[in-house]
Amino acid sequence: MEAFNESLWKEAEDDRNRPHYKEGTCIAELHKEDLDSLYYLPETPYETIRYESLKADKYGFVTVDQKKYSTSPRFAKQRVSVGISYNQISIFKDDEVIVSHRRMYGREKESMDWVPYLSLMAKRPTALKYTTFFDQLPRPWKEYIDNCTLSEKKEALKLLTTIMKDQQMEKAVEALKTASQRGHPSADAIQQVYHQHIHGRGYRETVAVPQHLPSMPKAHRGMKKYNAFFPSEGVSEDA
């Protein structure tokens, strides 16, 4: 929509260079005459948005034009403020933005932002497999979570909360694949590789230790080396 509006603006800019259909003078020149009669534009931009107070259902969804938008589990059955524009739905509570959605048109019925829900699921990770969020996860992450213990699932969900905020799921898949090359990784290991990808440093291979090591004299255990400092009759050879 934004790109389409930009293209229309360019068409309007180009169109003013043609002669006016009635006056015969270039439209751009006629517009310069009109500028002298125009009022000043307001200093504050006018936002084409309307606000409504809506009550979330028991799952934390609000309905706008028969489309459902998620808020957060903690706002279930509570009233929230909803800002509605042509391309975005913003949900507020006490003037603080809870979540923003792309406004849906056509056959789409539900928009779900999982970030507010992930912290709740981290407390009950066994319910994760029965959510649409789990179905939408890339295959490597689904297989990884399936192989996690209960405590590992909690840590994995906490990591996913961060990743979903960054909106870098593709890099998270790369990080998981890299961290899994040497077996089942921990969430901390995945996070470390993920940050390396995000900050442009890439994955750093473990330094290979040379197989040939310099020969060292054999170390002998025991106290016999100290016998030279004592009279022989007072020290046992097996000391």
Image (tube, rainbow, N blue to C red):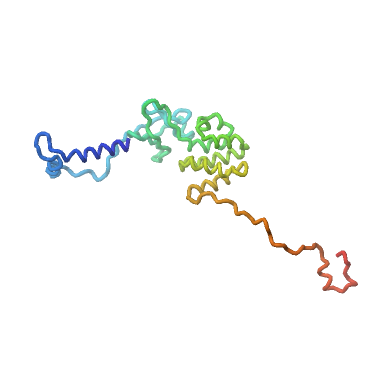
Residue appearing at x 46%, y 41% in the figure: 167
* Residue 182 at x, y percent in the picture: 62, 44
Q: Residue furthest front?
A: 212
Lateral position of residue 115 relative to residue 5, left or right: right
Q: Residue furthest right?
A: 233
Q: Which one is nearer the viewer's eye here, 72 or 138? A: 138
* Residue 222 at x, y percent in the picture: 81, 63
Lateral position of residue 180 relative to residue 90, left or right: right
Residue appearing at x 25%, y 39% in the figure: 9
Q: Quadrant of residue 216?
A: bottom right
Quarter of the figure with the C terminus: bottom right
Q: Which one is nearer the viewer's eye here, 22 or 155? A: 22
* Residue 2 at x, y percent in the picture: 32, 37
Q: Which one is nearer the viewer's eye here, 214 or 5? A: 214
* Residue 215 at x, y percent in the picture: 72, 62
Quarter of the figure with the N terminus: top left
Q: Quadrant of residue 227?
A: bottom right
The image shows residue 41, relative to residue 104, as above or below, that is: below
Q: How many marks?
A: 0
Lateral position of residue 232 relative to residue 74, left or right: right
Lateral position of residue 165 relative to residue 182, left or right: left
